[in-house]
Amino acid sequence: MAIYMSDEPGFIVKFYDKAYEKMDLLQLINAPVDAISGVSKADAEKLKKAFNIKSVTDFATNKYVKCAQAATSFAECTEQMLNKEFQSKDFIELVDKPVHAINGISTGDAELLLSAFNIKTLKDLANNKYVAIAQTTVALAGFFELLQDINKI
């Protein structure tokens, strides 16, 4: 049971270049990052140089993206999670730190992210629309793999 992006009008197809619209989701997760509309080959090369990101899956599951998203999520809900006496501005201000605040991201890597995607802070990396597209694609592919497994039973 192949699910093609173009099977659903207005579905995720609008987020990918036309050359990829006939791929099913399980193929698309292995597509290069520049398959995502708005990501140029030069931008994809910068991601590869900085973090060895080669595919949509690599982008969606990148450990630095996940670190930035975790810090951002924590900062956004810290007031709800912690009693007032334990809250700290440090957590809230963390999202405004430069991306090279994450251990393993060099200032050179940060410059590549800035040049390719205008990413300056952890929050910028966590909320980047291209990251969201890649993560949504990988999540949908996982869901459709599950559906295929259920249909085999």
Image (cartoon, rainbow, N blue to C red):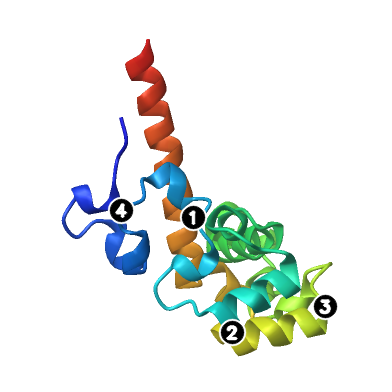
Q: Quadrant of the N terminus?
A: top left
Mark in the foreground, 4 or 1: 4
Q: Which SS class for mark 1?
A: helix
- Where is 136 relative to 2, above or below? below
User: Of callouts 4 and 2, which one flags the residue occurring earlier in the amino acid sequence?
Assistant: 4
Q: Which residue is mark 4?
A: 22
- Measured as percent of width and height from the top left, residue 152 is found at 37, 14
Tell me the crowding category of disc 3: few under 14, some 14 to 19, or many 20 or more residues within 10 angstroms, Cα based.
some
Q: Which residue is mark 1?
A: 135
Residue 93 in sight from this viewpoint: no
Q: Quadrant of the C terminus?
A: top left
Q: Which residue is mark 3?
A: 106
Q: Which mark is residue 33?
A: none
Residue type for callout 1: Gln
User: Of callouts 4 and 1, which one flags the residue occurring earlier in the amino acid sequence?
Assistant: 4
Q: Which SS class for mark 3?
A: loop
Q: Which residue is mark 2?
A: 116
User: Of callouts 2 and 1, which one flags the residue occurring earlier in the amino acid sequence?
Assistant: 2
Residue type for callout 3: Ser
User: Of callouts 3 and 2, which one flags the residue occurring earlier in the amino acid sequence?
Assistant: 3
Residue type for callout 2: Ala
Q: Which SS class for mark 4?
A: loop
Tell me the crowding category of disc 1: few under 14, some 14 to 19, or many 20 or more residues within 10 angstroms, Cα based.
many
Q: Which SS class for mark 2?
A: helix
- Between marks 4 and 1, how big is the CA–CA gap? 19 Å
Residue depicted at x 69% and y 74%? 94
